[in-house]
Image (cartoon, rainbow, N blue to C red):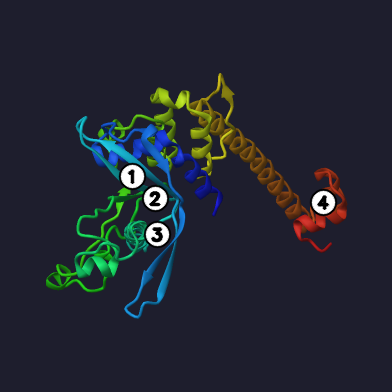
Amino acid sequence: MGKKDAVAKDYMRDSDVFADAFNYYLYGGKEVVKPENLQELDVTSITTFYGDDGKAIPFLRIRDILKRATVMTDGEATYLLVLGIENQTQQDYAMPVRAAAYDVGEYVCQVNATAKKRGKGGKAKLKGEFLSGFHSTDRLVPVVTLVIYLGPEPWTAPRSLHEMFDVQNPELLRRVPDYKINLIEPFRMTDEDFGKFHTDLNSVLKYLKNAGSKRKLEELTESDAAYQSLAPKTASMLNTITDSKLKLRRRKGRVNMCQAIREMREESEAIGEARGRKEGREEERAKKFEAFGGLVADGLISMTEAAKRTGVSVAEFRRLTGLKR
């Protein structure tokens, strides 16, 4: 796992941020998923499929983040969800297949766990119950995988399984089950979208949307007070994800990203000005040697005299002017 992926995974695992992402995507910003009602699940597991011949087919899954959520809808009804986040710092052109495999794997795992708990075929009344160990009264827990894109350009990879097919015949495709990924992509988000978050995830996504333009990024961090007092973990994550190389300084336990960006710009401008002055001096020096080289070539002064006037040795003068004598 690369540094960017590791940092993003660590940041999104925070229960407040995790819940905020799903509340935005599933409930329009309503705080239905509570951080305290999230339970961390093992992200590495092997699901076993069984073929018609009874042979086991293992399927290894390694998720980014996986949690079980207890959700209350109206104060009375409570239900469970399995929620997973896949962080993408780069585009994955097979994401629909990958996400579908994760979700199906979770459902297979639930079926197998139910059958094992009861004892495969135990107390089965119907033939289908005996074969799978999953009874007609058993129920699955819904699985939602949310892809959070943290890359530097808009997402152009497929958003659904159907987009990955070469076949475009609508009559055929309507019989082929589709799978659409649940995607949070900062580049397509509006101010209204950003207003539905309740954690620093709001600042993270806005920053990423504007990271491609230094001018827009500076305008954002100057106009939005949130960037003048970010949590160090958020500031560090943004610095790593965007390769910004900002010098982050803490003050009272917070980080002023606006100041860091301003300092970076000023330092960049100073370096640019110094480089410009150096290039100017080198250009003047080159013109000087060109002029004296011309005088030597025309026989107006000696090479020794020219070298003396330009402050270099005769050998160095020859090298710089290309003159042989």
| Residue labelled with disc 3 | 92
Asked if residue 250 is positioned above or below residue 276 in the image, the reply reads: above
Q: Earlier in the sequence, mark 3 or mark 4?
A: 3
Find disc 2 in the rendering and name its residue: 153
**How many neighbours does mark 1 have within 10 angstroms: few (below 14), some (14-19), or many (20 or more)?**
some
Among the 4 quarters of the image, the one containing residue 96: bottom left
Determine the residue located farthest toward the bottom in the rendered image.
53
Q: CA distance from mark 1 to mark 4?
A: 66 Å
Label 2: few (<14), some (14–19) or many (≥20) C-alpha neighbours in 10 Å: some
How far apart, in angstroms, are the residues tagged by discs 3 and 2?
13 Å
Q: Nearer the viewer, residue 129 or 94?
A: 129
| Foreground tag (2 vs 4) | 2
In three-dimensional space, the C-alpha distance between marks 2 and 1, rounded to whole angstroms, equals 8 Å
> Taking 23 as reference, is 204 left or right?
right
Q: Quadrant of the C terminus?
A: bottom right
**What distance separates the C-alpha of mark 2 from that of mark 4?**
61 Å
For the residues bearing labels 3 and 4, Cβ distance under 8 angstroms: no
Which residue is farthest front? 123
Q: Residue furthest top?
A: 252
Label 4 sits on a secondary structure element that is loop
- Which residue position holds label 1? 187
Q: Nearest to the eye among marks 3 and 4: give it.
A: 3
> Where is residue 298 drawn, in percent x and y?
75, 57
- Spatial separation of the CA atoms under disc 3 and disc 4: 69 Å
The residue type indicated by label 2 comes to Glu
